[in-house]
């Protein structure tokens, strides 16, 4: 199984599921441009191959899981996730996870936080873990108009029960997670979206969450997905993040880029490019 190291920190990509997105609905207004400019990145039907990848991180003696994918519940319009099998393939039991770091609270990032217990309650899938959320992100999604909105059942299933069970921890902004890991605010996709920065032994990396969904955004950072809460803000955040990652020579971990989504961003002839590891 592929593993990447950033100094003393080990990162293992775990595939929850592969997905295909229609560029005409995923990046509204740019579908035709995508078909013309990036046909080589599409399948035979013109769809965008993408992924839902979570990242297992071993740092400072602890085991972290960054995001938990779609989960095993059947949800209309979504494939079922198999993070549970990916963890088993990596030799990791749910009870081995010390902390779950949620970059944000969309359906494809919190799905395996909980399971449905036989009595109808929600049980934490990672029984020994503390689940971290950004305070601003939590406050936004827990408003009744979001919590009770159609299509947001995952909030009541995969997030709210963790607070009721005393398993959730809310943190503010740029918060140190341990001596090597830090939350980096990257708002726009959602109000409290964060990436996870890594720094160890002179090396750096970043797990970007949904700050970027696809390599085409290296060329067109303003191609914001339809799921972005604030597409103008997300475009600015994305553009700045790309440059920061290049300037700081960080290893790039992008969970929606084709699995495993790991590599380096570089500038070549004045253009940003991705070099997979």
Image (cartoon, rainbow, N blue to C red):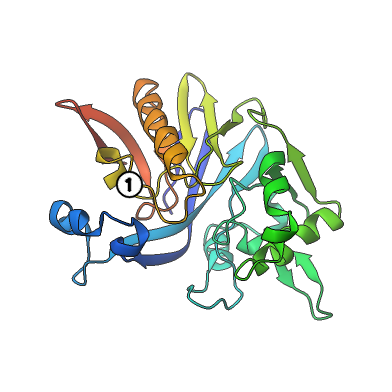
Q: Residue at x 63, y 48 (%)?
A: 102
Q: Residue at x 69, y 44 (%)?
A: 133
Look at the image and tell me whether residue 151 can be seen: yes
Q: Position of residue 176 (x, y in %)?
A: 66, 27
Q: Nearer the viewer, residue 29 or 236?
A: 29
Q: Quadrant of residue 158?
A: bottom right
Q: Position of residue 116 (x, y in %)?
A: 74, 74
Q: Position of residue 120 (x, y in %)?
A: 81, 78
Q: Residue furthest bottom?
A: 118
- Taking 128 as reference, is 251 left or right? left
Look at the image and tell me whether residue 127 can be seen: no
Q: Quadrant of residue 251?
A: top left
Q: Residue furthest top?
A: 202
Looking at the figure, which quarter contains the C terminus? Answer: top left
Q: Nearer the viewer, residue 275 or 219?
A: 219
Above or below 140: residue 149? below
**Structural crowding at the residue carrying mark 1, measured as other residues with C-alpha within 10 Å and reported as few (<14), some (14–19) or many (≥20):** many
Q: Residue at x 47, y 47 (%)?
A: 210
């Amino acid at each position: 199984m592929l593993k990447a190291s950033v100094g003393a920190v080990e990162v293992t990509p775990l595939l929850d599921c592969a997905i295909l997105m229609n560029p005409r609905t995923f990046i509204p207004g740019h579908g035709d441009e995508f078909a013309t400019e990036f046909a080589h990145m599409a399948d035979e039907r013109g769809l965008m191959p993408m992924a839902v990848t979570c990242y297992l991180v071993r740092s400072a003696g602890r085991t972290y899981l960054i995001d938990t994918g779609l989960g095993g519940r059947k949800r209309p319009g979504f494939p079922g996730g198999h993070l549970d099998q990916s963890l088993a393939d990596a030799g990791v039991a749910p009870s081995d996870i010390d902390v779950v770091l949620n970059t944000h609270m969309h359906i494809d990032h919190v799905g395996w936080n909980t399971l449905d217990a036989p009595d109808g309650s929600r049980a934490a899938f990672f029984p020994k873990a503390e689940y971290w959320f950004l305070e601003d992100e939590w406050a936004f999604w827990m408003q009744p108009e979001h919590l009770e909105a159609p299509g947001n059942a995952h909030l009541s299933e995969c997030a709210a029960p963790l607070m009721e069970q005393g398993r959730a921890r809310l943190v503010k902004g740029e918060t140190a997670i341990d001596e090597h890991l830090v939350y980096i605010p990257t708002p726009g996709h959602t109000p409290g979206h964060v990436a996870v920065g890594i720094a160890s032994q002179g090396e750096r990396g970043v797990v970007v969450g949904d700050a970027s969904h696809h390599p085409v955004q290296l060329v067109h950072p303003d191609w914001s997905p339809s799921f972005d809460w604030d597409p103008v803000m997300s475009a600015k955040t994305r553009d700045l993040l790309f440059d920061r990652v290049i300037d700081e020579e960080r290893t790039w971990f992008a969970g929606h880029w084709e699995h495993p989504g790991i590599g380096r961003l570089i500038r070549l002839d004045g253009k940003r490019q991705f070099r997979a590891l």
